[in-house]
Image: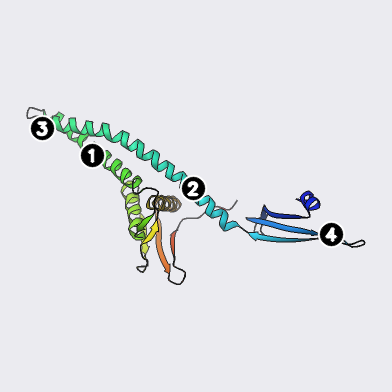
């Protein structure tokens, strides 16, 4: 940086990472100019530092969302491949169950196969419904319905019996123009993170708010977990 200043007399939007007093880091853009002093006076450097931490966070969130979208597409493909053989297994099991001459012990075994195959198909169908929610095009959705669908999916396929779910929704929120698939993937990631932070017992609180003047909607997901350990 010093060499650039001496050569060009200025630097523009030079990305740096600064350390705060609490040892945390912050991303910034540094711009500056070199004011060469006249004979007998010292050179002066003027700096302008711009905080871009929020921009970095948004960029990371977008990258994570794209990653989750790819995982969702892969999961949908796998689900389709699993669904077909499950249908065949279920069909043959039900066909054998209808046999009037079937032995009672074999009948009981087939009923177990039928039950668990149906459970597997239910999981696959939920995964497919979640993955195919929409194309990349945005559409008007009700955000509370999207949150509840994700929450119901997690409750159905994950252990939440000892975790209290608290909801505080702002009913004034209008339909939002969003990519439904991506917003659900973000919500899924945040709620699952909260679940892991809480552990076997605790509480997860979901709240929304609408600012009429700025037309901005905020979604907050909080938990009673211990948080991230400082390093």
Closer to the eye: label 4 or 2: 4
Callout 2 secondary element: helix
Going from N to C along the chain, the mark reached first, 4 or 1, is: 4
Question: Could you say which disc has been placed on residue 118 in the image?
Answer: 1
**Residue 20 or 149: which is nearer the viewer?**
149
Q: Secondary structure at mark 3?
A: loop
The residue at the point 56 percent across, 58 percent down is: 54
On residue 98, the disc is 3
Q: Nearer the viewer, mark 4 or mark 3?
A: 4
Work out how far the residue at label 4 is from the one at label 3, CA to CA, in angstroms: 95 Å
Q: Is residue 21 visible?
A: no
Tag in front: 2 or 1: 2
Mark closest to the chain's N terminus, 4 or 2: 4
Q: Residue at x 31, y 34 (%)?
A: 82
Along the line of sight, which residue is nearer the eye, 25 or 10? 10
Q: CA distance from mark 4 to mark 2?
A: 46 Å
Count of numbered circles on the image: 4
In the displayed structure, does residue 168 sit left or right of residue 42? left
Where does label 4 land, which residue? Answer: 36
Q: Residue at x 27, y 33 (%)?
A: 84
């Amino acid at each position: 940086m010093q060499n650039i200043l001496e050569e060009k007399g200025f630097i523009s939007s030079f990305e740096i990472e600064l350390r705060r007093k609490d040892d945390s880091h912050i991303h910034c853009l540094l711009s500056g100019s070199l004011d060469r002093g006249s004979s007998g006076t010292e050179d002066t450097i003027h700096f302008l530092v711009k905080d871009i931490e929020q921009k970095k966070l948004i960029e990371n969130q977008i990258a994570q969302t794209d990653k989750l979208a790819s995982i969702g597409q892969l999961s949908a493909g796998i689900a389709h491949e699993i669904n077909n053989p499950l249908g065949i297994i279920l069909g043959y099991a039900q066909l054998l169950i209808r046999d009037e001459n079937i032995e009672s012990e074999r009948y009981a075994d087939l009923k177990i196969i039928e039950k668990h195959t149906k459970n597997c198909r239910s999981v696959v169908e939920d995964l497919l419904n979640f993955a195919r929610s929409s194309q990349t095009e945005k559409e008007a959705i009700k955000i509370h319905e999207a949150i509840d669908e994700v929450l119901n999916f997690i409750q159905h396929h994950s252990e939440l019996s000892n975790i209290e779910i608290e909801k505080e929704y702002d009913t004034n929120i209008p339909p939002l123009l969003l990519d439904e698939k991506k917003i659900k993937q973000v919500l899924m990631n945040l709620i699952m993170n909260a679940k892991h932070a809480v552990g076997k017992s605790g509480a997860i609180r979901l709240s929304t708010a609408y600012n009429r003047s700025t037309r901005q909607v905020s979604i907050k997901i909080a938990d009673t977990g211990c948080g991230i350990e400082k390093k």
